[in-house]
Amino acid sequence: MSAVTIEINDAVFCAPHIKEVCKDCDYDGREENDGFYGFDAIDREPLQPPAVTTNKDGVYQCKKHGSAECNLCFGWKKQITRLRTAAKKAGKK
C-alpha cells in the first residue's frame, strides 16, 4: 500500500501529515522531489513545509501569505540545495 500524497507548488508530501518523510505513512518523497528539480537523490534532511491551507479550488497555499506559488514559503529548489549542501558537509552520500 502506498501513501496518499499531495503536491504543494511542485513538491510532494504525505497527505495526512504534510511531511516529505513520514514514518507514520512509511513515505519518503525526497528522491521524487530531488529528481523533479534535477538533483540526484542523496540522504538529506527532509523539507519542512510551512503551515498551509487550501483555497476554494482545493489548491494548497501558505497560511502566512495566502499564495499557492509563494516563493518565500515554497522555495523548494533553494531549500533542497541548502539541505543537500548540509548533508554533504556532514559526510552523507
Image (cartoon, rainbow, N blue to C red):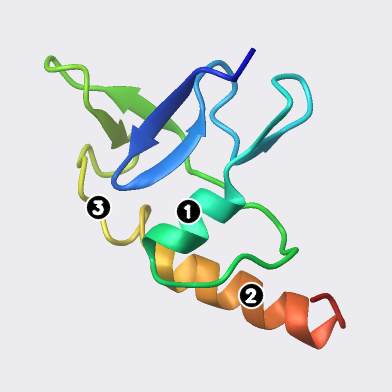
Instruction: Identify which residue is drawn at 50% across, 67% down.
Output: 79
Judge from the rendering whether residue 13 lies leftward or rightward of residue 92; answer left or right.
left
CB within 8 Å, label 1 to label 2: no
Name the mark on residue 8. Answer: none
Judge from the rendering whether residue 69 lies leftward or rightward of residue 75; answer left or right.
left
The amino acid marked with disc number 3 is: Cys
Residue 45 position in % (x across, y down):
72, 59
Judge from the rendering whether residue 25 lies leftward or rightward of residue 76; answer left or right.
right
Mark 1 Cα within 10 Å, few/some/many (few <14, many 20+)?
many
Instruction: Identify which residue is drawn at 50% across, 44% down.
Output: 49
- CA separation, marks 1 and 2? 12 Å
- CA separation, marks 1 and 3? 17 Å
Mark 2 Cα within 10 Å, few/some/many (few <14, many 20+)?
many
Tell me the quadrant of the picture where the N terminus can be found.
top right
Q: Element type at marker 1?
A: helix
- CA separation, marks 3 and 2? 22 Å
Q: Element type at marker 2?
A: helix
Q: Label 2 belongs to which residue?
A: 84
Instruction: Identify which residue is drawn at 34% across, 24% down.
Output: 53
Q: Label 3 belongs to which residue?
A: 70
User: Above or below — where is 52 with respect to 36?
Assistant: above
The amino acid marked with disc number 2 is: Arg
The picture quadrant where one finds residue 55 is top left
User: Above or below — where is 31 with respect to 17?
Assistant: below
User: Above or below — where is 26 with respect to 63?
Assistant: above
Name the mark on residue 33. Answer: 1
Question: Viewer-nearest of labels 1 and 3?
Answer: 1
Tell me the quadrant of the picture where the C terminus can be found.
bottom right
Residue 58 position in % (x across, y down):
21, 17
Residue 56 position in % (x across, y down):
13, 14
The amino acid marked with disc number 1 is: Asn
Outermost residue to the right: 91
